[in-house]
């Protein structure tokens, strides 16, 4: 094998390819639907990535590892939100084959440097090496070439969801090994004292500041928490954001179930007969 610069070692990652090319990319969040079939269903629906949420669910590592494999075999990118900033969560998620790992509740620049240390191989970080990895379909790849490819092609995505992190946006983007960020709109609004008020100038100016910082450093940015606000998403996309958490499995199921019940209630009301 040659070097990664000769493109002999590649990791299929449609999520990364699309967002680096500036293509708007919705992600479906997974919290409850854990059957491996969901990966192919999402693929057939047109999604290029799934967002497997370990922070706001009871999903365990074994279940997540199986979902990651299903995504990789189906040809969509598994993006996993870690339940914490702990190195044992980050390294296990990446060792399971995730295309990207998102880390919640970043507060300091040093925390981001620590994340790079845990998530990237030397010389960027100090992640422990292993071979025959799921992301390479369990094939053996020489360690140097494997580590170079994974440092570049798998993504570390800190989350900006507090006013403090917003103020540090440029410093966060400047760190080598940070591959983009995800804005957590709900937590950000809550910390700003305006929970759920996405039209408030404080939220709008915060997101604008982060997007401007991302554009300055040429790194992609995602928007979370406002999948139903297509007007706002279009605004952020027009400014340079490229991806968002667009929908969740629980909401999709509930909306579908409500529609079925409503259809039958409509039939019942049309056929209702006077009581004798």
Image (cartoon, rainbow, N blue to C red):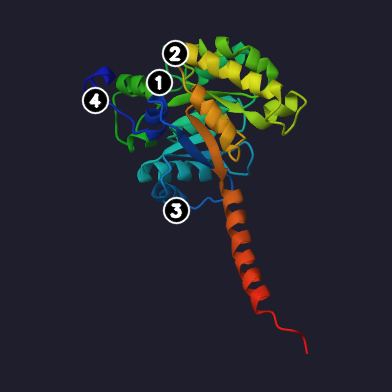
Looking at the image, is mark 4 or mark 3 earlier in the sequence?
4
Using a 10 Å C-alpha cutoff, classify the residue at mark 2 as few (fewer than 14 neighbours), some (14 to 19) or many (20 or more): some
User: How much space separates mark 4 and mark 3, taking CA atoms?
Assistant: 31 Å
Of pointers 4 and 1, the one earlier in the residue sequence:
4
Q: Earlier in the sequence, mark 2 or mark 1?
A: 2
Q: Which residue bears the numbered disc 3?
A: 37
**In the rendering, at what x and y percent does residue 175 appear?**
51, 11
Find residue 54 and report its horizontal and vertical position in percent.
59, 38
Q: Nearer the viewer, residue 124 or 250?
A: 250
Relative placement, left or right, of 182 versus 11 is right
Residue marked by disc 4? 8
Q: How many marks are shown on the rendered structure? A: 4
Q: Tell me where residue 253 sits by quadrant.
A: bottom right
Asked if residue 234 is positioned above or below residue 48 in the image, the reply reads: above
Circles 2 and 3, Cβ within 8 Å, touching? The answer is no
Q: Label 2 to label 4, Cα distance in Å?
A: 21 Å
Residue that mark 2 sits on: 124
Callout 1: 10 Å neighbours few (<14), some, many (20+)?
many
**Is label 1 in contact with label 3 (beta carbons under 8 Å)?**
no
In 3D space, how far apart are the residues under numbered discs 2 and 3 (Cα atoms)? 36 Å
The percent coordinates of residue 115 (x first, y second) are 54, 19
Are dots 4 and 1 in contact, CB under 8 Å? no
Of residues 66 and 163, the one nearer the viewer is: 163
| The label number, if any, that marks residue 151 in the structure image | 1
* Quarter of the figure that contains the C terminus: bottom right
Q: Please, what secondary structure does the residue beneath circle 4 have?
A: loop
- Residue contact between numbered discs 2 and 1, judged by CB atoms under 8 Å: yes
Q: Return the mark for residue 72.
A: none
């Amino acid at each position: 094998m040659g070097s990664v610069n000769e493109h002999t070692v590649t990791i299929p990652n449609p999520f990364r390819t699309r967002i680096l090319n500036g293509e708007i990319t919705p992600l479906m969040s997974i919290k409850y639907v854990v059957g491996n079939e969901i990966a192919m269903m999402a693929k057939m629906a047109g999604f290029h990535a799934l967002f497997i949420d370990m922070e706001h669910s009871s999903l365990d590592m074994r279940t997540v590892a199986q979902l990651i494999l299903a995504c990789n075999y189906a040809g969509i990118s598994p993006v996993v939100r870690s339940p914490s900033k702990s190195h044992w969560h980050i390294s296990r998620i990446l060792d399971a084959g995730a295309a990207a790992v998102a880390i919640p509740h970043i507060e300091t620049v040093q925390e981001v440097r620590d994340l790079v240390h845990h998530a990237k191989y030397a010389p960027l970080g100090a992640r422990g090496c292993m071979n025959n990895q799921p992301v390479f379909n369990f094939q053996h790849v020489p360690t140097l070439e494997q580590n170079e490819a994974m440092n570049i092609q798998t993504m570390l995505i800190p989350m900006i969801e507090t006013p403090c992190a917003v103020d540090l946006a440029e410093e966060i983007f400047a760190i080598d090994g940070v591959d983009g960020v995800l804005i957590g709109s709900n937590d950000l609004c809550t910390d700003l004292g305006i929970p759920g008020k996405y039209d408030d100038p404080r939220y709008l100016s915060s997101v604008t500041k982060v997007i401007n910082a991302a554009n300055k450093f040429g790194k992609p940015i995602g928007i979370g928490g406002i999948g139903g606000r297509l007007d706002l998403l279009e605004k952020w996309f027009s400014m340079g954001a490229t991806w968002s958490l667009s929908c969740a499995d629980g909401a999709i199921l509930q909306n579908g179930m409500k529609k079925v019940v409503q259809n039958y209630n409509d039939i019942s009301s049309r056929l209702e007969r006077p009581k004798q």
